[in-house]
Amino acid sequence: MTAPVSSSPVRTPKTVLFLAILNGLIGSPFSFATDINREPCALTGVVADFSRHQERQKAALKAEQAAMRAQGLPVREVNENELETEAGYLARYLPGVRCERITYESDGLKVTGFLWTPEYLPEGMKVPVIIFNRGGTGDESKLRPNTQYGFDRFVREGYAVIGSQYRGNDGSDGTDELGGSDVRDVIELARLTATLPFIDGKNMFALGYSRGAMMTLSAARDGVKFNAVALVGLPSDFRTPQFDRTFDKPSAGTESQRASRSAILWAEKLDTPILLLQGGSDPLVSTEQQTLPFAARLQKLGKPYELVIYDRDTHGIMINGADRDRRILAWFRKFRR
């Protein structure tokens, strides 16, 4: 299927030539190139295999629960039926989701990412968009074509989902700074996404996991106007000892680096409604040290927010994944225009 047709007015060759000359002379904002390059994803070799998926789920849960025990956090014994069901898993593979690999520029750097949309978009139709900000660092945590199978619930609800790998990852130029200048990769992606002909720029949301939750709030602080955001496992205060190993050896800039990434220090600059979702026994981002103090700060400032803590759940809220996504969709629906 071809990409959606742009609704931009047709320009004659003479008009194009005139505007190109004008642009060269006075720096006009006219642009003739596609600002987000899009290519179909290669999904070859991706096969629905529930048994393998279930084994990976159980292995990931076991690893996190071992970390919980090591930290003295409460652990919940989980019946495999409480994890994703086979019916729910196979539903991800039904037709209806289109995947594209994207490339765009940020600070003059080439940055890669992915876009997922409803497969059939009538010409002229505009859909709301979710800017997804991934967690982790490096290529190990990068987005992949089959990540769409985690986004199918959102796409089938009529959203487009677009996400950046951030600079320095997956063939992108530059260096990943874990919330430094790479925040501009999110800001630029949001700006460019709003110009896509099938995107409803009045309905832009953001979803961030872990490091991506911090990137989401940093972009909102720096001017991106999201209708609402949902955050899973937000590290809100990088000054705590939990993140001593996150940064390089102590240097003059370390304190300011931590502060610039710590939303609890600049929560007064956040005006977008925030949904905070947290696993109660998250071994990577402390509920006690990170989530509860940040929620208290929002409460004191009178900011619009909602907090949900899932008893003895994991960093990504694996046990209550279906409820997590249901709440995210309900939160975004509440702020649709």
Image: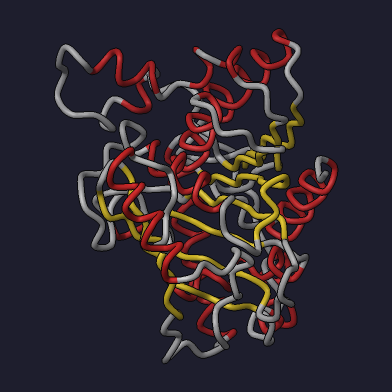
Q: Position of residue 148 (x, y in %)?
A: 56, 71
The N terminus: image quadrant: bottom right
Residue in the image at 66% along x and 41% along y? 230
Tell me if residue 78 comes above or below residue 118 in the rendering: above
111 to the left or right of 36:
left
Q: Position of residue 261 (x, y in %)?
A: 41, 24
Residue 5: which quarter of the image?
bottom right
Q: Position of residue 258 (x, y in %)?
A: 34, 20
**Residue at x 60% of width, y 47% of height:** 207
Left or right: 284, with 243 as reference point: right
Question: Please, which residue is most extreme toward the top here?
Answer: 300
Q: How is the image coloured?
A: secondary structure
- Most foreground residue, 81 or 12: 12
Q: How many numbered discs sit on the rendered protein?
A: 0
Q: Is residue 176 left or right of residue 160?
A: left
**Residue at x 71%, y 75% (from the top left corner):** 123
Seen from the viewer's position, the closer of residues 321 and 203 is: 203
The x and y percentages for residue 70 are 42, 40
Q: Residue at x 36, y 34 (%)?
A: 179
When the figure is inspected, residue 13 is found, relative to residue 277, above or below; the finding is below
* Vertical order, 62 against 334 (above or below): below
Q: Quadrant of the C terminus?
A: top right
Viewer-nearest residue: 287 or 123: 123
